[in-house]
Image (cartoon, rainbow, N blue to C red):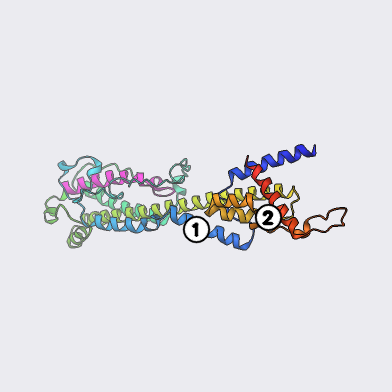
Amino acid sequence: MAKNKKDNSSIELASVFEEEEIELPGGKTEDDDEEFNRLLNDFIASELKDIDTEIEEKKEEIAQDAKVRHVVRQPEERGEPAKSVQRTSDESPAPTASQPQQTNTPTPAIDKQAPAPQPDKSKIVLQEEEETLFSAFQNFQNAIETMAAQFDLKTPKFAVTEELLYPRYKPKVSAVFTDATLDGWDIILKAHSADLKDLRPDAGDDDILNFAEKEEDETLQLALISYVEVLIEIESCEIAYESRRIKAKKRWLEKKIIEEHEARQAKIKKYIALIEEQKFPINSERLVINYFKTARKDPDGAREILITNPATYSPIEVAKIPPRLFGLIKSKPEDGIKFNRIIGNFLKKLKA
């Protein structure tokens, strides 16, 4: 019975050896905790090496894109919604005025989650970025509706609502804003084509704001200013979204690494317990921890040392070797050499 138990323990220990031979972190000491934290930070830095610059790069892209926005056109020139913001560059458009930016970075369950249930409209409270964007668009919508009434034009049906921005802005809603601003520009061009003759077709944000400042028609002035505000606030929401996505990915990676570390620590404890069952005169915990530390850098070399000279990782404790001949002959250093070989042979068989 005892033999079967020993054989089962050996087989179980062998499986642990084969599974965790290379990558397991250290044990329970403060030095090992510091080592794990260092490895965790190094891993995250390696996996997310481009993330720290993503937001700044996005800001630079937006700044370059904002220099030239071809928005002032004749209504008949209007094509598909994606063409609402023409560009002088062949680069892909920023996600703010046309379509959401595509990214190859895996997103840990931000948009993949089921949409949150919508509360009553009276109970919706938007976050700061979304509230500012919605307020800017309301100003634009009010100006367009007033202008349409003044010139007896058909008022567009705008689809922008508070629910669209709840609970947070997502890039996919930019298409709705694109359609809405195009509908608004159709009204502006029909009502004030003569007034806009001095505004260049490739006018940028600053050009539109400077033109609006000199405009005497308050409705047209409000429409132009609020239009630029909508574009700016969309960009702000895009940057906030990217920041949330990046933080979520980092938290996901941290959680994943910590879970893997905890699972490996549990296996190390099990490994130690199985060795201790053999009652070898050696510190099993020290042996296991030092072996895996070395195995992270040199798995083959660490394995060779483990089966030929395990005392390298933890010295043989001669005082724990039981005396022979009913306690008459005390243990000697030579007995430690013998047990070093016995332990090595035992561990070597475990891999089979």
| Category of crowding for the residue at label 2, using alpha-carbon neighbours closer than 10 angstroms: few (below 14), some (14–19), many (at least 20) | many
In which quadrant is the C terminus drawn?
top right
Identify residue type, mark 1.
Asn
Magenta stretch holds residue 185: yes
In which quadrant is the N terminus drawn?
top right
For residue 206, say whether it is visible.
yes
What span is colored magenta in the figure?
Answer: 161-190
For residue 149, say whether it is visible.
no
- From the image, state whether disc 2 or disc 1 is nearer to you: 2
Q: Main secondary structure of the magenta part?
A: helix
Q: Please state the total of marks drawn on the protein image.
A: 2
Under tag 2, what secondary structure?
Answer: helix
Place of residue 53 in the rendered image (x, y in percent of width and height, measured from the top left): 36, 58
Task: Tell me which corner region of the image, top left, top right, bottom left or bottom right, holds residue 311.
Answer: bottom right
The answer to which of marks 2 and 1 sits earlier in the sequence is 1
Place of residue 4 in the rendered image (x, y in percent of width and height, measured from the top left): 76, 37
Identify residue type, mark 2.
Glu
What residue is shown at x 41% (from left), y 45% (from top)?
Answer: 163
Q: Nearer the viewer, residue 287 or 47?
A: 287
Task: Tell me which corner region of the image, top left, top right, bottom left or bottom right, holds residue 54.
Answer: bottom left
Left or right of 326, for residue 247: left
Left or right of 294, for residue 62: left
Place of residue 221 in the rendered image (x, y in percent of width and height, measured from the top left): 22, 57
Q: Nearer the viewer, residue 201 or 334?
A: 334
Write down the residue under mark 1. 41
Place of residue 154 in the rendered image (x, y in percent of width and height, measured from the top left): 22, 41
Q: How far apart, in angstroms, are the residues tagged by discs 2 and 1?
A: 26 Å
Write down the residue under mark 2. 285
What residue is shown at x 60% (from left), y 59% (from top)?
Answer: 32
Magenta stretch holds residue 191: no
